[in-house]
Image (cartoon, rainbow, N blue to C red):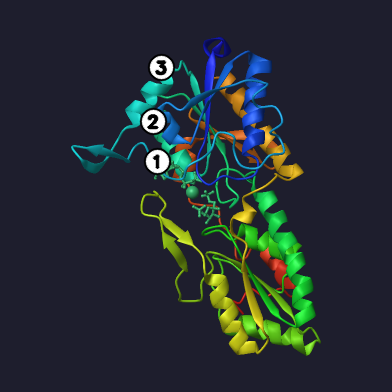
Amino acid sequence: MVVNKIKRIGILTGGGDCPGLNPVIRAVTRTAILEYGWEVVGIRNGYKGMYNGDFVELTLDSISGILHEGGTILYSSNKDNLFDYQVEEDGKLVNKDVSDVGVENIRKMGIDVMFIVGGDGTLTSARDFARKGVKVVAIPKTIDNDLASTDTTFGFSTAVDVATEALDRLHTTASSHHRIMVLEVMGRYAGWIALHSGIAGGADVILLPEIPYDIRNVARTIEERKARGKNFSIVVVGEGAKEIGGDITVREIIKDSPDPIRLGGIGIKVASQLEKLCGNETRATILGHLQRGGSPSSSDRILSTRYGVEAVKLAASGKFGNMVTLKGDHMSYDSLENVIGRKSKLVNPNGELVEAAKSMGIGFGDE
Ligand SMILES: Nc1ncnc2c1ncn2[C@@H]1O[C@H](COP(=O)(O)OP(=O)(O)O)[C@@H](O)[C@H]1O
Ligand SMILES: O=P(O)(O)OC[C@H]1O[C@](O)(COP(=O)(O)O)[C@@H](O)[C@@H]1O
Ligand SMILES: [Mg+2]
């Protein structure tokens, strides 16, 4: 019954891009057209496109060949909060709530349901549009894997693969030169990418935002390796890692971004401290946006497809104001109110994975 009321859906991607966005767009479009006979409209550049009316018709043809492509054919933005949007009025720049303009634009386009793909920021706006009466179905995305309502987000596995490959490559050059190699990876305040790639890439030390470290403990782990005849070491640092009693390292503040802090620089700091303490030549690599670009892994393609198909089914059954989730191996959903109300999902310092790593002799700098 609900199905018959939907004729046209819209889809937008917001926040930092990540591998898997194109497979989600493809899954939503194909399922909507093939299973339900709906029309699909893409909204370009995240919420900015909703404000400017930047819409594009999505057809089976136009989404063909994007499954393996990184990025998003709809583009993305981590600025442009329509509830607090910068506009020019009487020659002055002022911030205003222009969300009604966005709602009116999608109404004029005949969009019955909005599919919104994003992380905590994008989904905060999605919740606010749902509160205004827009029929919203949300799909979680972030390489950081820090959204609490779902077990795993797409993009994470690809980011971990990229970081793991970087560690494999750093290993050989570290060994040739008896160096300490420090790799800084993304993740904001969550250490998932650092922990997973560190284990997969055989790191000797993993520094996480969730486990503040003492650099002397890190140096001791490296010295113990040297005593066993290993004169090189690999350290993975999550960008949000900090010393015990210390602060996060901020790279820059992006003023017009609702989440203005950009982390970065901790890898260089750790490398220079270790060079002094251990005496080995030390180099730092900041992996940066290589983790976000490029083709999604096969598991991310599958996960994105599952999220996309499930989101369309959720809309067809009239369950609006929800985000699709993965719980164990089951697709489910949670209300956007709950999703946004929850704290970020962080690494448990006493969890099984950290304990397993410690059992393997990996140092975390805390002891
Ligand atoms: N607190 C907020 N309230 C409403 N919208 C927000 C908020 N934070 C971010 N947004 C909007 O969500 C989008 C993406 O934000 P960002 O946090 O950078 O990415 P992500 O969705 O990956 O978390 C931007 O359009 C931004 O304006
Ligand atoms: O691309 P930018 O603006 O430099 O932002 C970098 C940040 O975005 C991320 O890559 C992804 O974060 P989001 O999922 O919240 O967009 C973080 O890991 C990183 O700290
Ligand atoms: Mg965010």
The reply to whether callout 2 and callout 1 are in contact (CB within 8 Å) is yes
Question: Alpha carbon of mark 2 to alpha carbon of mark 3: how far?
Answer: 12 Å
Residue 348 against residue 334 in the figure, above or below: below
Q: Residues within 10 Å of mark 1 (few under 14, many from 20)?
A: many
Q: Can residue 15 be seen in the rendering of this structure?
A: yes
Q: Amino acid at mark 1?
A: Asp
Q: Earlier in the sequence, mark 2 or mark 1?
A: 2
Residue at mark 2: 51
> Which percent across, then down, holds residue 266?
53, 71
Mark 2: secondary structure = helix
Q: Earlier in the sequence, mark 1 or mark 3?
A: 1
Mark 1: secondary structure = loop
Mark 1 close to ligand 1, CB under 8 Å: yes
Mark 3: secondary structure = helix
Residue at mark 3: 108
Q: Residues within 10 Å of mark 2 (few under 14, many from 20)?
A: many
Question: Alpha carbon of mark 1 to alpha carbon of mark 3: how far?
Answer: 21 Å
Q: Amino acid at mark 3?
A: Lys
> Which percent across, then down, holds residue 123?
47, 39
